[in-house]
Image (tube, rainbow, N blue to C red):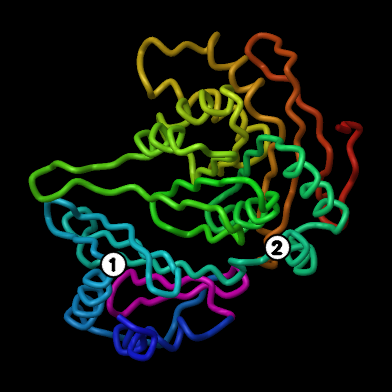
């Protein structure tokens, strides 16, 4: 599909995809189609029928190379413009197809650009640039749609150009501005149930590809153990994780690797996390829909009763950033 006829494939949704203020589109039913603008959702006046929606999604999935059917009722795919598509179909959903299209309005922005957009202060932007240059291991935490991928992309783009970076994602979303960058994504199983390529497999393969840095789009499950092992082997890296605060993001990284097997213990994980992660950056969405860095947390190596010592470097108090006592 070329750019000239992309709009034909999006049909009546093109008006929202072309609107620079629309961040996300989701379809709960043919009569209930929503969009998010500046972090707030609103019901549109667009009404379709089930056949229109299914025909539209079939055309998009044909381009993406992904499939959806009763045996595989979910799909995660990328649109030609880089937007992320997720679909769930009955009987997983009650009656209608559930569709989400997440646009990346700020993708390609640098840390300085995000500071200009008030995602952070100029002081924090310069601080983060220095941490990336010094090869710190950074965990980006936050809720859904808080801007984790956008910030991760900006952090990755701040890596010195002489380094070789390998990115690993479920769906291609990162596009760091680097000359030596290899992007890899997972793959689902085929009709016979074979051919799946997981994040865990990609991390192991990436270590054989001479990486200077490893960037994981999102840590959700047992792949967190492989990331920790890679970081503790001397390869700097970054990743995102869903969490409600910087400290909760760190605690979650202490528990997710337990999914890797019964032989993984907390006594092993806690010091491993403390040695692997240097900084946690937490993002949130303000009441007015603005995305903003809420906390920057320095991770220490002192541990008491499986609790890792941390120091708050910056915190948003609702009006300005307060500087903590922790310094590098």
- Examine the rendered structure and indicate whether residue 63 appears above or below residue 120: below
**Left or right of residue 32: residue 231:** right
Q: Which quadrant of the figure contains the N terminus? A: bottom left
Report if residue 39 lies within the magenta region: yes
| Residue 46 vertical placement versus 193 (above, below) | below
Callout 1 environment at 10 Å: few (<14), some (14 to 19), or many (20+)?
A: some
The residue under label 2 is 110
Q: Is residue 14 left or right of residue 94?
A: right
Query: Which residues, given as a range, are shown in magenta?
Result: 21-40
**Local secondary structure at mark 1:** helix
- Determine whether, in the image, residue 46 is placed left or right of residue 287: left
Q: Position of residue 237 (x, y in %)?
A: 60, 37
- Give how far across and how far down residue 191 sits, in percent: 10, 50
Instruction: Looking at the picture, tell me which residue is in the foreground, 208 or 305.
Output: 208
Report how far apart the C-alphas of labels 2 and 1 lie in the structure: 28 Å
Quadrant in the picture for residue 108: bottom right
Question: Which residue is the site of mark 1?
Answer: 64
- Within the magenta stretch, is there residue 32? yes
x then y, percent, for residue 165: 56, 46
Q: Which of the pair 268/154 is nearer the observer?
A: 154
Secondary element at tag 2: loop
Quadrant that contains the C terminus: top right
Up-down relation of residue 51 to residue 84 (above or below): below
């Amino acid at each position: 599909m070329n750019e000239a006829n992309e709009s034909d494939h999006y049909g009546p949704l093109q008006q929202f995809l072309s609107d620079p203020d629309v961040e996300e589109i989701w379809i709960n039913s043919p009569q209930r189609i929503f969009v998010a603008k500046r972090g707030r959702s609103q019901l549109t006046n667009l009404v379709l029928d089930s056949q229109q929606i299914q025909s539209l999604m079939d055309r998009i999935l044909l381009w993406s190379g992904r499939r959806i059917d009763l045996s595989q009722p979910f799909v995660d795919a990328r649109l030609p413009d880089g937007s992320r598509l997720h679909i769930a179909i009955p009987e997983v959903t009650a009656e209608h197809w559930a569709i989400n299209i997440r646009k990346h309005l700020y993708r390609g922005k640098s840390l300085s650009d995000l500071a200009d957009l008030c995602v952070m202060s100029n002081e924090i932007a310069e601080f983060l640039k220095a941490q990336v240059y010094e090869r710190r291991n950074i965990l980006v935490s936050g809720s859904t749609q808080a801007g984790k991928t956008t910030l991760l992309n900006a952090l990755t783009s701040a890596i010195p150009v002489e380094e070789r970076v390998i990115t690993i994602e479920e769906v291609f979303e990162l596009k760091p501005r680097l000359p030596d960058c290899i992007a890899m994504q997972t793959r689902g199983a085929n009709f016979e149930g074979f051919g799946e390529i997981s994040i865990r497999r990609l991390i192991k393969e990436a270590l054989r590809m001479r990486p200077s840095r490893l960037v994981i789009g999102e840590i959700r499950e047992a792949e967190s153990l492989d990331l920790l092992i890679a970081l503790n082997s001397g390869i700097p890296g970054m990743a995102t994780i869903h969490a409600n605060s910087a400290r909760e993001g760190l605690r979650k990284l202490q528990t997710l690797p337990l999914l890797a097997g019964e032989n993984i213990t907390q006594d092993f994980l806690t010091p491993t996390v403390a040695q692997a992660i240097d900084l946690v950056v937490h993002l949130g969405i303000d009441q007015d829909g603005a995305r903003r860095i809420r906390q920057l947390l320095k991770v220490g190596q002192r541990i008491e009763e499986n609790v890792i010592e941390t120091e708050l470097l910056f915190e948003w108090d609702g009006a300005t950033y307060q500087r903590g006592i922790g310094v590098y």
